[in-house]
Image (cartoon, grey):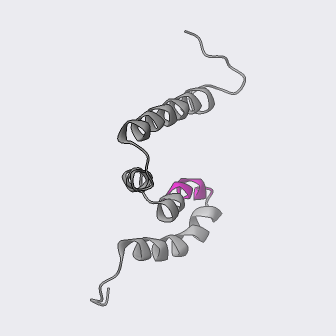
Amino acid sequence: QDGRPIVARDWISQIYDSVWPIAKQNGIGCFLVPLKKILRDGNEAQQWLQRYHQGQTSQDIIAQAIQAALVQEQFLETDLCQPLGQPLVA
């Protein structure tokens, strides 16, 4: 806005802080929660690189990501796609 350079993380954090009360008041704050986690922990690629630099192998990192994706898919399938109390039908 004023021509000064700013780190994207800082800029997003400033915007987040200004919109959070409005989002919370309107019942949509839950959609901003993942953004806060990304600002804190980095995106998935950044997390993978950090694990690699900590000594994990590429194969282990990918295997963990596959397992995490499976868990996430199961969560979405059971908790978001089905009415409460309704079992999945194969």
Nearest to the observer: residue 59 or residue 86: 59
| Viewer-nearest residue: 85 or 68 | 68
Question: x, y percentage for residue 87?
Answer: 66, 17
Please, is residue 71 above or below residue 24 in the view?
Answer: above
Image height check: is 73 above or below 57? above
Q: Position of residue 80 (x, y in %)?
A: 58, 33
In the image, the segment drawn in magenta is 27-35
Residue at the farthest right position: 85
Q: Main secondary structure of the magenta part?
A: helix
Q: Residue at x 59, y 54 (%)?
A: 30
Q: Is residue 56 above or below residue 28?
A: above
Question: Which residue is drawn at the image coordinates 43% and 71% (left, top)?
Answer: 12
Residue 73 is covered by the magenta coloring:
no
Residue 29 pos. (x, y %): 59, 59
Residue at 63% x, 56% y: name it: 27
- Residue drawn where x is 54% and y is 54% of the image: 31
Quadrant in which the C terminus is drawn: top right
Left or right, residue 78 beside residue 57:
right
Would you identify the image quadrant in which residue 33 lies? bottom right
Query: The N terminus lies in which quarter of the figure?
Result: bottom left
Q: Is residue 51 left or right of residue 20?
A: left
Question: Could you tell whether 2 is left or right of 60 in the image?
Answer: left
In this rendering, the count of numbered labels is 0
Q: Which sits in the foreground, 18 or 22?
A: 18
x, y (%) of residue 51?
44, 51
**Residue furthest to the left:** 3
**From this viewpoint, which residue is outermost toward the top?**
90
